[in-house]
Image (tube, coloured by chain):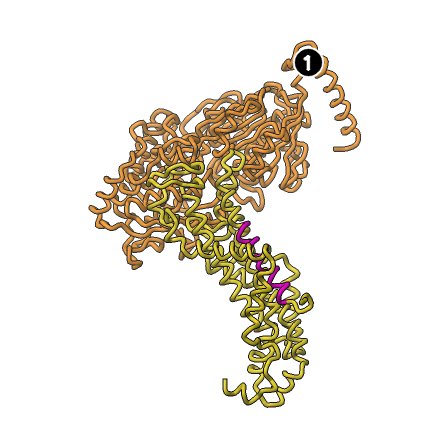
Amino acid sequence: MSRVDLTPVAKPPTARPQGELRRFIQRFAEDRVALVGFGLLVLIILVAVLAPVIAPQNPYDLGKVDIMDSRQPPGVKAGDGFTMWLGSDGVGRDLVSGILYGLRISLMVGVISGVLAATLGLFLGLTAAYMGGRVETLIMRIVDLQLSLPSVLVALILVALLGKGVDKIILALVVVQWAYYARTVRGSALVERRKEYVEAARSLGLSHARTVFKHILPNCLAPVIVIATVQTAHAISLEATLSFLGVGLPQTEPSLGVLIANGFQYMLSGKYWISFFPGLALLLTIVAINLVGDRLRDVLNPRLEK
Amino acid sequence: MDKNSTIAYRQATTWRGVSFAVAAILAGTSPLALQAQELKIAMSSEPSSADPHYHNLTPNNQVVRHVFEPLVFQDEFQAIGPGLAANWKIIDDVTWEFKLRANVKFHDGSPLTVEDVIFSLNRVPNVPKSPAPKTAYVRGKTIEKVDDLTFRVKTAKPEALMLNHLANIEIMSAKAAATATTEDINAGKGNIGTGPYQFVEFVPGDRFVVKRNDAYWGQKQPWAKVTFKFIKSDPTRVAALLSGDVDVIETVPTADAQRLSKEPKVTVSSALSNRLVYLHMDRYRAETPFVKGKDGAQIKNPFHDLKVRQALTKAINRPAIIDRIMEGEAVPASQMLPDSYAGTSKKLKPTAYDLDGAKKLLAEAGFPNGFKLTIVGPNGRYTNDTKIIEAVAQMFTRAGIETAVETLPPAVFFSRASSGGPDKQPEFSMILAGWSAGTGEPSDSLKSLLGTYDTKLGRGSANRGRYSNPAMDAVLDKALATVDFDKRSAMLAEASEIAMNDIGLIPLHYQKNSWAAKKGLKVTARTDEYTLAMSVKP
């Protein structure tokens, strides 16, 4: 980073010294509930990543799933010999395996769509704030339009047009989410743009791109991190909603939403477990992410600093 | 409903309450006390119109059947009997003479005459914007009036299914409906029939209401008013019955059928339906897009090989699907209709599950390692359709055919399955679909699903696999021109055997239709899936 040394004045003021990360972790850990949420989230991510190793059945392999095992209550042994601790669904899928693999898909869809939407939103939001004028008006009106429509509706229309599949769901989720990032980052960037260090960078003749991404962006990240956690939880529940409505992921590779939808028709006949356990897994995931997100907001917000 | 009739209705309600109380004191729950009640029926799908000739669709046909009647009735087993026509005779191969029932009056008081019959048969092909007209039922038929109550129908060539066709044509009043459009009829203008109930209102998305016709020529009905509510969601429909919002529900979800039959407040009745659920295979392309080799390379279409088709049908464990997916609400299928129907073959039996046999046949056909296949089907058109496809995919995968499943919303599925490919040809390689035989015998199913595709002859209209077998076509054509019932039935059985032994399609099961009603009501189950207030007795 020899070039940064040439421009000491333009060094972003929040570039953290070594001890700051530790202080951040300490502050985060002060809240016991957030810590529990964080632990839960780590656990969920771990089991999702390790699903192929720990799941008793590969629920995507139709040669392994047997309809003779269908609709079994929790604790019954499957034809293959293992015990289905959470029972099985209407086509004989073991629910423990289904939930583990479902978590994988749900988290993957949530995280990938979040990262893509954040990238797109950050780029457009920063461009709008930095360029101003017509570019800003155009981008921000599109954002307004996007935010004025219910996200489920937009996603439903997109998926109906694009068709089924993981890639299409991710695309639809990116389209409904980028506007949140764009609006948030534009707000922070507008403030940062007028600060002296930006002026200094400009007066040294740095390019627009370098000024925006090296100097303004790092100072706008705190609110984006908070938005990112909330939006990831939102994306996961939106994916579940779409799958529940039958336009999401394919039946044979079920996400949590598909599993819940599959059990819905059995609710009245007393076979609660088909919907209940995947629903519980979805609930815990979203609660864990939200707890972490809430705490991040508190820690990163300078106004709440003690 | 205007003000006066509202008052009259209220008075009637009060009087009904009094009479009910008195009757209850005198005789417990006598049938008389129940006579003035309202009946509420929940339908699982919604009619698109109240115009009887607008759309040939089961929910439409079933609601308009309360208001309008055909010349010929079909009973709960779809057996033919006299309707508005009291009797008929065959003059020669192409001429039938019908005699109308005397003293039948329309709801506006005018008598039924031959003019009304002529008007109705002429109206059928001329309903504007009809999505599925009943034109096929009147094609090639001309009517001659003999006297006010007698007429003759002449056909271009011998028409074996004359009575089955006429059973699908509702007779409207020429006087009332002469200028009425479909919109008028939906709004109640010109909605005048001879049926046991009179039209009250049709609210799309919500309900269809009729009231008793007190001047009805036939058996007097027990219900003063009948409301059909449209409740598509299965659990909601069951909940509506259990909470007492409705008295009868149709299409009892299989997941709830067993529990409901144990419920003390509810009675369940079911009948084997005329609906076959089957798999259709691509038989017209040399290479078919949804079949690939195990390595993902395009291979020749395996479905042209009889051994592959035999392997597929042997790989399916029909009793398992019925037990685990349909929860007993279906019967294994061997042909187009259950063999209790006329024209079916007694020799055809459902293929037994034989996994090793299937693997052996696949190896003999040159696919020892199987291939990759995607089955496509509708989600939500037939009972448990998605799960049936998943179960079949499991079974095919066990036999070595690595099978994927794709389900689509029904409207999208049917348009792509019929004409989504190049040149408006069927798109998919294997589909799941269902077919209900409206005529109550197999000629219609054989002609539509397995007849060589020919738009001019109206043959193969739903043949989404483009199966073609000239031997079957020849026997079927001969049967359709044979007026003698027994001879025709034998020919239809022969045509069924030719097509099924050649595995033109893979039959899975015949659906059962079931109804649930609150205790005390008796619902006569019908094979044609119609839910009629006339079938509900207190």
Q: Which chain is yellow?
A: A
Question: Looking at the picture, which amino acid does disc 1 mark?
Answer: Ala
Asked if residue A90 lies left or right of residue B211, the reply is left
Q: In the image, which residues are magenta?
A: A283-300
Q: Please identify the residue farthest to the left as the structure is shown.
A: B364
Residue B174: image location, x then y, percent:
63, 33
Q: Colour of chain B?
A: orange
Asked if residue A139 lies left or right of residue A172, the reply is right
Residue A219 is covered by the magenta coloring: no
- Residue A81, above or below B108: below
Residue A79: image location, x then y, percent:
34, 38
- Residue B12, above or below B442: above
Query: Residue at 47% of width from left, 32% of height from top?
Result: B165
- Crowding near pointer 1: few (<14 within 10 Å), some, many (20+)? some
Residue B217: image location, x then y, percent:
61, 20
User: In which quadrant will I find the C terminus of chain B?
Assistant: top right
The residue pinned by badge 1 equals: B24
The quadrant holding residue B536 is top right
